[in-house]
Image (tube, grey):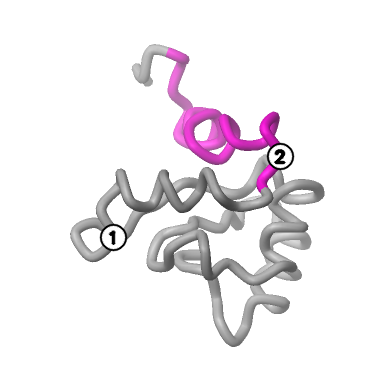
């Protein structure tokens, strides 16, 4: 699922929890506007199913990352969202090769 799903965030979280092949990307919004329930689930039950996305060129990656640093995402979850979940989902090894 692309973009934080306002006003359907709770429904998106429910679908992602229920369906093993559904992931949520965080593109389309600055992290400063993420709803609390998205942050809560990204930190816990969905920490392996949330993916980075900047929505470039509307939100440049450097701005998105700076805003992400200000969110309440746990330090141990940040690398999952920013890189590790995508590596696993796309079947890449750590060097970025398939």
Label 2: element kind: loop
Residue 24 horizontal/vertical position (percent): 56, 58
Residue to which mark 1 is pinned: 59
Label 1: element kind: loop
Residue at 31% in and 60% down: 55
Residue to which mark 2 is pinned: 74
Q: Which picture quadrant has residue 39?
A: bottom right
Residue 28 is tagged as none
Q: Which picture quadrant has residue 35?
A: bottom right
- Asked if residue 11 is positioned above or below residue 82 in the image, the reply reads below
Residue 29 horizontal/vertical position (percent): 42, 67
Q: Magenta span has 13?
A: no
Q: Is residue 82 left or right of residue 48?
A: left
Residue at 30% in and 44% down: 62
**Which badge, 1 or 2, is on the more N-terminal residue?**
1
Q: Is residue 84 left or right of residue 48?
A: left
Q: Which residues are magenta?
A: 73-94
Residue 88 horizontal/vertical position (percent): 55, 30
């Amino acid at each position: 699922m692309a973009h934080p799903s306002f006003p359907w965030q709770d429904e998106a979280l429910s679908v992602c929890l229920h369906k093993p092949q559904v992931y949520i990307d965080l593109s389309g919004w600055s992290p400063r506007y993420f709803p609390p329930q998205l942050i809560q689930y990204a930190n816990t039950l969905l920490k392996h199913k949330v993916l980075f996305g900047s929505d470039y060129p509307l939100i440049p990656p450097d701005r998105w990352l700076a805003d992400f640093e200000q969110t309440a995402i746990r330090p141990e979850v940040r690398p999952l969202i920013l890189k590790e979940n995508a590596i696993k989902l796309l079947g890449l090894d750590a060097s970025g090769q398939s």
